[in-house]
Image (cartoon, rainbow, N blue to C red):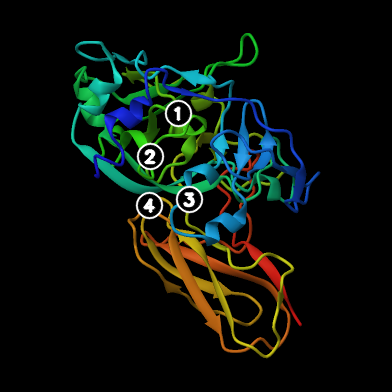
Amino acid sequence: MNEGRLSRRALLAGAGGAALAGPVLARKLVDLGLPGGPSLRPLDPQFPGKGEMIVQRIRAPLLETPMAVFDEGLLTPNNRHFVRWHWEMPTRVDAAAHRVTVGGAVERPASLTLDEVVGAGERVEVVAVNQCAGNGRGLSDTRVTGAQWGNGAVACAKWTGVRLRDVLAKAGVAPGAKRVRFAGLDVPLTDGAPQFLKSIPLEIAMRDDVLVAWGMNDEPLPLLNGYPLRIVVPGWFSTYWVKMLSTIEVLTGEDDSFFMAKGYRVPTQPVTPASGEVTMVPITTMPPRAFITSHADGDSVARGRPLTLRGIAFGGDAGLARVDLVGAGADRPCTMGPDAGPYAFRRWEVTLPAVTGDLAGIGVRAANVKGAVQPERLAWNPGGYARNVIERITLRAS
């Protein structure tokens, strides 16, 4: 870690911490091509600290990354990283006054300053994909409730922090502990609404790569992405990556809080919109996914000329094993770029020797080292979670 690029001084961002001003009014629209409802979304305002983003909601902010951004490199720039808040986020954080309380089933409850969190153990860096569990929900063939994301509620960054287990050691985990629960500074918009709480099993919390992070791509976390601290759980959906971390609680039993017991749950068996009541469990790990980023649906390509396609893929909760181009009679393996780690985006590329006609329904299929492979058909569920169907586009020969 380069201390000069991400120092304690940078983390504290001065005595006042970080602040957020209001967004600029939108001037442009983008069509996400959502099959079940309105598809137009504002593309600009620019929220403070963010470039051009697809605006799903202003309060609490839901900002989607335009797909073209993913064609620019392996790491998603901080100013283009998607944003997802459930409740109202503070517009200012005083880093000097911020505390993280560690309680519950611990031997000595603690209230830690940022200095104490940073000093809890060695600095760790991990490159990992951060993806909303509902990414792609708006593309469901049968519309479901929730944020109608396109495929841009995902990003890849280098995260810097300290291991969660080292922060827990400051308080000492008591015998009988089963789960570790997190809360941030966001506040429900209406009276009686549940606080956003998420928890992970103790054995996951103790992993080498599960972090309390303060750095994102060698800079302090942007306020919109959770400054000054957030949880990072590589391979798991970002619902567990709690932002503006303020509370860590060790539990001895199951977590009955709303967003664990009722929200973010998926069926244990295949279902359809007509299915009755089924057993549901919390969503956890990500499946593999791949996208074409060099071209968009409906683009024209030169007939009779070679065509190079490229994009990104990731293995979900395991390293990427392969990426294959599929559809339009062009099936073939893709060449994969450098490996930044098992939880990171990986670039892929493939060249067709000559375009002979339209390429209808062409896509890429990712497989990870555990044997998980993207399916041909969408595994529908009532929450629109964990979409990983092969994403297809059509290119027109001209």
Q: Nearer the viewer, mark 2 or mark 4?
A: 2
Sequence-first tag of 2 and 3: 3
Quadrant for the C terminus in the image: bottom right
Q: Are marks 2 and 4 in contact (CB under 8 Å)?
A: no
Q: Which residue is mark 4?
A: 343
Q: Residue furthest right?
A: 38
Question: Circle 3: is it few (<14), some (14-19), or many (20+) Cα within 10 Å?
Answer: many
Whether residue 208 is visible here, answered yes or no, is no
The residue lying toward the viewer, choosing from 163 and 251, is: 163
Please, what is the three-letter code of the amino acid marked with disc 3?
Answer: Thr
Residue 219's place in the image compared with 116, above or below, is below
Whether residue 78 is visible here, answered yes or no, is yes
Q: Which residue is mark 3?
A: 76
Secondary-structure class at tag 1 = loop
The residue lying toward the viewer, choosing from 319 and 272, is: 319
Please, what is the three-letter code of the amino acid marked with disc 2?
Answer: Glu
Q: Where in the figure is residue 17, as x and y percent of width and height?
A: 41, 21
Question: Circle 4: is it few (<14), some (14-19), or many (20+) Cα within 10 Å?
Answer: many
Please, what is the three-letter code of the amino acid marked with disc 1?
Answer: Lys
The residue lying toward the viewer, choosing from 150 and 178, is: 150
